[in-house]
Image: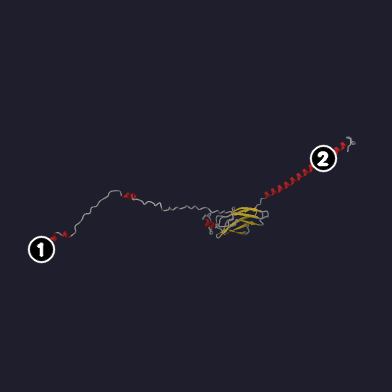
Amino acid sequence: MTFMVDILWAATVSPLASQPSLTKTHIIYIGGDYDDYDEETPQPKPNSSLPRLTTARFTPQQCEYDLCVVQDVPCFELSAQTKCYCPGLTGLDQVPESPQLRELKQRASGEVEVYWCAPLSAITHYKVVMDDEDGTVFSESSRNATIQGLKVGSRVCVVAINNAGLSVKNDRSCARFEPQQTSQAALMSGVIAGCVGFLVLLSLAALLLWRRKSCKKAGTLDGEGLRNPSYSASETI
C-alpha cells in the first residue's frame, strides 16, 4: 500500500518526468549584404568551341519598274520573284488617279502616237478618248497607242479604269493636238533656199564659162591678124 502511494505522489509532483528532454539549437548568424549575392554569383563562361550564329540584315530594294515604259511582267509578280517592293499603289476598290500624258507625236504617215505614264493605282485597262468620242480600250500594260484621223486642235485624254470607276480628265491626262507647223515650214524653207542657191551657182558657173570662151576666141583672132601681111591696123571688121 505504501508503494502505491509513493508512485501516485511521484506522478503528481513530477509530471514532466515522463516527457522527453528539450535540446537547445545554436543558431549562427553570418553578417554581410545580401544585395551583393547576385554580383558575386559566378556566371558560366561561353564555350568557344560552339559555332556563333550570325544574322544577316536584309534591306529591301525598290523594284526596277518604270511607270512610263511597257512592262512584260506586272510589278507584283516581279516583287514575288526578287523580294523587291513596288511603289505604293491604291487598290482596285479605289478610283484610280489620272495617268500622265507625255507626248502626242505625229508620224510621216499622218498617224498620231500617244505616250503616257501609269498612275500609282491598280487598274484593269486604259482608254484613249478623242474629244467626246467613246475612245479605244488598251490593256493595263500599255503605255502608248496609235490614233488615226486625228484633227488639228482635237483634245486627247488617257483614262485609267478599274473596278471602282474612271480617273478624272484633267490637264495631266489630256492635251491638244497641235502639230509643229513651224518645224515643217522651216524644213520647206530650207529646201527652197537650197534649190535657189543651187540655181544661182549653176548660173554663175555658166556665165564664167561663157566669158572664158569669149576671151579665148578674141585672142585667137588677134593672133591671126598679126601673122597676115595684108592686115593693117586701119582696117576694121
Between marks 1 and 2, how big is the CA–CA gap?
195 Å
Quarter-of-image position of residue 125: bottom right
* Disc 1 packing (10 Å; few <14; some 14–19; many ≥20): few
Considering the image in quadrants, where does the C terminus appear? top right
Q: Position of residue 30 (x, y in %)?
A: 27, 50
- Report helix, strand or loop for mark 2: helix
Q: Residue furthest left?
A: 2
Please give the residue where the numbered disc 2 appears in the rendered image.
Answer: 216
Query: Mark on residue 130?
Result: none
- Report helix, strand or loop for mark 1: helix
The type of residue carrying mark 2 is Lys
Residue at the (82%, 40%) spot, across then down:
216
Please give the residue where the numbered disc 1 appears in the rendered image.
Answer: 3
Residue at the (72%, 46%) spot, across then down:
194
Q: Position of residue 231 (x, y in %)?
A: 89, 36
The type of residue carrying mark 1 is Phe
Q: Residue furthest right?
A: 230
